[in-house]
Amino acid sequence: MTLVFEHSMKRPQRARHTSSVQKESAIVDGIDISGHWNKMYAPREITAYDPGALDRVTAIPGAESMGWCYQCGKCIGVCPVDNVGDYGPRKLFRKLQMGQDLINNPDLWQCTTCMNCLRVCPKEVDMIKIMPAVRAQAVLDGTNVPQELQDMFRNVAEYGNPMGESARKRVRWAKDLDFEVKDLSKAPQPVETLWFVGDYYAYHGRGNDAARAMARVFNRMGVDFGILGSEERCDGDSQRLAGEPGLFQMLAEHNIEQFKKHDFQHVVVSDPHAYNALKNEYPKLGGAFTVFHYTQLLDQRLERLRPLLTKRFEKKVTFHDPCYLGRHNGEYDAPRALLNAVPGIQFGEMIRCREQGYCCGGGGGGMWLDGFMSDHVGERLSENRVREAVAVGAEVLAVCCSYEVSRFEDAVKSTGNEGKLQVLDIIEILDHCMG
Amino acid sequence: MKIAVPLKQVPDLVEDLEVAASGTALDFDGLKMKLNEFDEHALEEALLLKEASGAEVVALAIAGAEADRMLFTALAKGADKAVKVSGVDANADNHALAQAFAAAIGPLGADLILTGVQSASDRDGQLAPLLAARLGLPCVSVVTGVQPQGKAVLLKKEYSGGVMAEFEADLPVVLGIQAARQTPRYAPVSKVRQVQQSAKLEDFAASGGAAPSQVVKMAPPPRGQGCKMLKSADELLAVLKEKGVV
């Protein structure tokens, strides 16, 4: 299915058991050691490969670890893309070793940076560093960057969100609430919690549902919170991983400047990508704040939350671990604590859960590469995951990353499971239980 | 070959446009500006000509909200020089802009001047013919496809009704670009930021003239009868019955 060899690559001579290759007698340093147990061959070319392709990658700062692979193949077993296609670090290494370029190649854009490979790699070949570094090179050179991704970069650069919507409409979702959300860009005031809402909560229909649920839950719990309003921009993490570190820096600098204008104790984020950015990347640019994912904040205040969950939610629920909360940042328990506090819930795990969670396909730029990926995978990662949720008997697939709701709802439809599986952000379930 | 590309900023239509309290202009406060899309095509065509046969591309913009961004982006895409022209408001009408651009372009000795065929903010005519008149040069507008041919260029010009004409124009000439040969390239922010550190914008001081026309009134178009959103098939049926359709 996949093109393995480029035409320009020199194919190695196949070693053959012929007399032209095997010598008549075995003479080493003048001593005849011939015998049926000793075979001597004329020097064979075992490397007719161009090492240039691999060297070009390992020369890129951040991509050095690509050269450390010793091809054990543990990564292939856990790579979510290989599960539905033909991919993984070992395969990429082998292709590079045989002279196939990675920079101008569709292989460069398939990795979702889910980190399952790094989790198991004995040599610490770090795709989370390699892919962004090589992609940044491709983006700078303008080499065959998928058009879908370029369109997304353009929207984020121009409007501060991937949808290409007006920055001024970022607070539109809050209009339908029957209470005021403190918009710090309009009325600066000290708050305990600065809620970084995020693009998908702000602009996507299903994200709006979750955003309103979040505001209602915070309100009922007496959380003292405010938002950056139309001054908030995309967190930039996926853009960084997809090859635009300059765009990430521009967004981070803007957001950090906004944060610094205000007086707050901690930042709470709606989605794990913002969590990863604010926790691990923003400090490198001078923006170090205490940051929680919303499940962590609510888990901390669980004893205040629990008595408010009065309405029962008697459904069979399973949970999808988001790669950027789970594997990348080690948080598996907070979402589960919240779900297990839901009255009437019947919670069950999927087989690929916690560290072994199966990626939804949205990370590392994948959110904006589904068209491109359709040429390379048999089914979408999100479709594969939805099938798993249905297979374990779930009626509800609970998530806590705003990328996932639309991905899984699409997959429910495209796998013919409409009506059988509901996809809900955890915050929507909690909001429901608050009556 | 030297190619000059004057770039205009226009209001971004992603925002809701509102008329200012004066009633004679847009409310620019909080309006997002961006590069005129047709000018982006003009720049793309210039860069393609450069890549095909080697040329020097000079981008120009009137000093204003978007000037720096437009010019550094042009440099990041491959333009060789960028000139920021001061002396006139970046949101002024095309007559004023043509005067300022002509003053800056004149000394360049450009063979080709490419600019967008039109823009959303054109009120008093298009920039390309006004610029050509000021420079005393010929102008062909609504151009797709520019092929240099020695001291001339072969052009395709679009007319309405699907009619296309081929022109041969002697250089120098001003062209109003309808569309470039391919979608304008994306300039990665990473590249633009690099360019911002390394490149410098040139300055040119021009003087604008008095506008030959003034806006006396600007207002949104009058609302029609409006549209009622129906929520169900029953509602639709009721309406159809009411109107006597069924």
Image (cartoon, coloured by chain):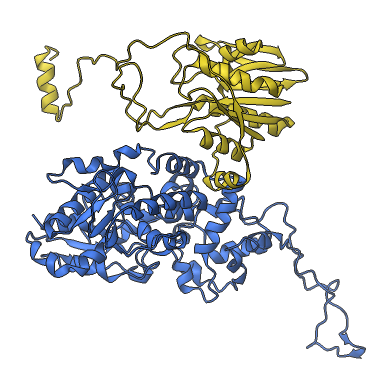
Chain colours: A blue, B yellow
Q: How many labels does the image show?
A: 0
Residue A298 drawn at (x, y percent): 21, 64
- Residue drawn at x 59%, y 71% is A69
Q: Can residue B39 be seen in this view?
A: yes
Q: Percent position (x, y) of residue A8?
A: 73, 52
User: Split into 4 quadrants, where in the image is the C terminus of chain A?
Assistant: bottom left
In x, y percent, where is residue A66? 59, 66
Q: In which quadrant of the rendered view does residue A29 lie?
A: bottom right
B188 in relation to A312, above or below: above
B210 or A315, nearer to the observer: B210
From the viewer's perspective, tell me whether residue B25 is left or right of residue B43. left
Query: Which residue ends up furthest to the right in the rendered image?
Result: A30
**Residue at (56%, 34%) from the top-left corner?**
B71
Decide if residue B169 is on the left or right side of residue A299.
Answer: right
Which is more toward the observer, A82 or B156?
B156
- Looking at the picture, does residue B210 appear above or below residue A11? above
Res A387 quadrant in image: bottom left
User: Taking the image as drawn, is residue A422 in sight?
Assistant: no
In the rendered image, the vertical position of residue B17 relative to residue A396, given as above or below: above
In what quadrant of the picture does the N terminus of chain A appear?
bottom right
Residue B136, image x, y percentages: 66, 10
Q: Residue at x 45, y 55 (%)?
A: A364
Please identify the quarter of the rendering in which residue B82 is found.
top right
User: Left or right: where does residue A278 sit relative to residue A36?
Assistant: left
Answer with left or right where residue B79 lies relative to residue B188.
Answer: right
